[in-house]
Image (cartoon, helix red, strand yellow):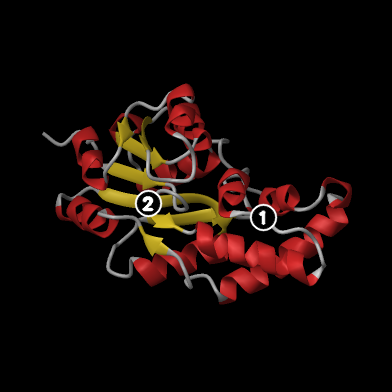
Amino acid sequence: MKTTELVIFDLDGTLLDTIGDLAVACNSVLAVRGLPQHSYEEYCRFVGNGIMRLVERALPEPLRTPENVALVRADFVRFYTEHIDAYTKPYAGIPELLAELVRRGVRVAVASNKFQTGTEKLVRLFFPEIPFVAVLGQRPGVPLKPDPAVVEEILAATGASRDRTLYVGDSGIDMQTAAAAGVRSVGVSWGFRAREELVEAGAGRIADRAEEILEAL
């Protein structure tokens, strides 16, 4: 018997490996200003709380004023949107997992802290055949995860029950979001954060391969 009717996925670090394009975009806008750039590993720690926080963390501390962050964010969004898929790719097994969920009649959605335009563009580019019931990113007036607002919005739009909803993500923020929304969670070990972070944040279970998510349904 099917127990899960809706699976909500985080995007960056869960469905797509986006860190290369995020790093290149942020380093490019820093370089134009003559500011220090950062490594791949540093960007893995910077991401997860939206573009504003990514930019804030990338800037030298004395330059983290609201005005500077807003200016650099605007430049970042322009560059990133134009070069959004230069290095980005789905993680192994993800396209097959999504197709199998659809085949089983399980609805799928995306809940991301990435800005809405970027979220929509990536989903269209990489998963054009998947009928997501919702693709939601960061929007004005909507709190970022771990606030459960985005999950609540998806539940309201789909009519899915909490006990038949599964949330899948790669970070502690995602696990906290699931807990705050009262839905089950799976942490994925292939993303940007350490397995220990998922455990400490209370992941319901941890998947090391995409197909293992099917076992949580």
Q: Left of 151 or right of it: where is 142?
A: right
Residue at point 15%, 37% (across, down)? 2
Q: Left of 27 or right of it: where is 126?
A: left
Please state the horizontal and vertical placement of residue 48, each as a whole percent of the image: 57, 45
Label count reads 2
Q: Residue 72 carries which label?
A: none
Residue 32 in the image: above or below residue 16: below
Q: Quadrant of the C terminus?
A: top left
> What distance separates the C-alpha of mark 2 from that of mark 1?
32 Å
* Residue under numbered circle 2: 109
Q: Nearer the viewer, mark 2 or mark 1?
A: 1
Please state the horizontal and vertical placement of residue 21, each as a whole percent of the image: 54, 65
Residue 27 in the image: above or below residue 47: below
* Residue under numbered circle 1: 38
Q: In which quarter of the image is the N terminus?
A: top left
Callout 2 amino acid = Ala
